[in-house]
Image (cartoon, rainbow, N blue to C red):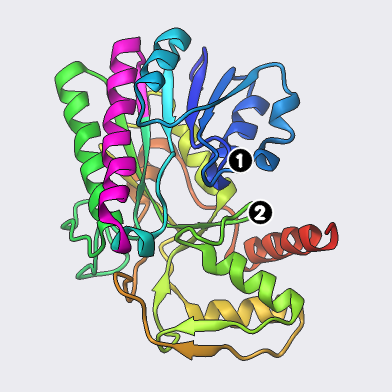
Amino acid sequence: MTTGSVLVTGAAGFIGSHLVDRLLEDGVDVVGVDDLSTGRLDNLAAASAHPAFRLVELDVTTPGFRDLVAGTRPRAVLHLAAQMDVRKSVADPLHDSRVNVLGTVNVLEAAVRAGAERVVFASSGGTVYGAPDTLPVREDAPLRPTAPYGAAKVAGECYVQMYARLYGLQGTSLALGNVYGPRQDPHGEAGVVSIFARALSTGAPTTIFGDGTSSRDYVYVSDVVEAFVRCLDGSARAERYNVGTGTATSVGELHDLLAGIVGVAAEAATAPPRLGELQAISLDSRLLARDTGWQASVSLPEGLRRTTAWVQSVLGSR
């Protein structure tokens, strides 16, 4: 584990807040950065009471971010802040690139100027490969994004690699599968889990876009956090690591699993597939396992049970 402070961008988001909690549990001083455009202060309720945590409300694309990092001088930066909605990226690619490309460049520039040793970048295993020739896809597969969001993540990875070569920064990109779990934002790549769990728990209708056969690699948030933590030390040597289970689950299967967990016999309506979304993806994560010992430990049924319990607890508190 890296000693000294760690700066986490997107700290109030779904994955970022879980990562903050884990780092604090591990005894790390954490500076969180979030502009709260999509992040929620509620996600940091426990962290905010911790003496080793500080949250700064700031946009990572601004010059003020570089000033913050210069004053903080973290040993590592974990960059998760992003515009994360594939459909929004298709509708407004300029905004997507401003946040996801220029924001990443600003983070890398700030890290180098402040003397940070390492940057770990949250990339997207669900979009950078496009439609792979074989599944599960390995890190050496061609990068063929089909939406601006995926293209921006590819660009971010290229900048991480370039800064590593130019300045000696230890840079790693984690190509994440479809992350799900408590605190999940329904607008992210795996937002369908939260959407289905909430709708099925309240008796609201559900909709599947396409014929229900499109599939994704769903990976539980605590397993993703573990990958970030393991990449903080020197065992992470590759430029990109996939973070997934290696198993593709169709959206129809996902709906049936969640309906069974909730205990309802609900059928989803269907609608045309949405522009920019893929038919199938699953990730081969053996490279990450080889270099760091990481492996996914939470099965999909167990992760869905935990997520559904959290959704229902939130609904019950309202």
* Magenta stretch: helix, strand or loop mostly: helix
Q: Residues within 10 Å of mark 2 (few under 14, many from 20)?
A: many
Q: Nearer the viewer, residue 138 or 130?
A: 130
Badge 1 element? helix
Q: Say which residue label 1 marks.
A: 18
Residue drawn at (50%, 60%) of the image? 187
Residue drawn at (45%, 40%) of the image? 293
- The amino acid type of the residue labelled 2 equals Pro
Badge 2 element? loop
| Magenta region | 91-119
**Residue 225 on the magenta span:** no
Quadrant containing the C terminus in the rendered view:
bottom right
Judge whether residue 75 can be spotted in this image: no
Q: Nearer the viewer, residue 149 or 37?
A: 37
Judge whether residue 251 can be spotted in this image: yes
Q: Which mark is residue 182?
A: 2
Sequence-wise first label, 1 or 2: 1
Q: Residues within 10 Å of mark 1 (few under 14, many from 20)?
A: many
Q: Are marks 1 and 2 in contact (CB under 8 Å)?
A: yes
Q: Where does residue 33 sit, x and y in percent of width and height?
A: 51, 28
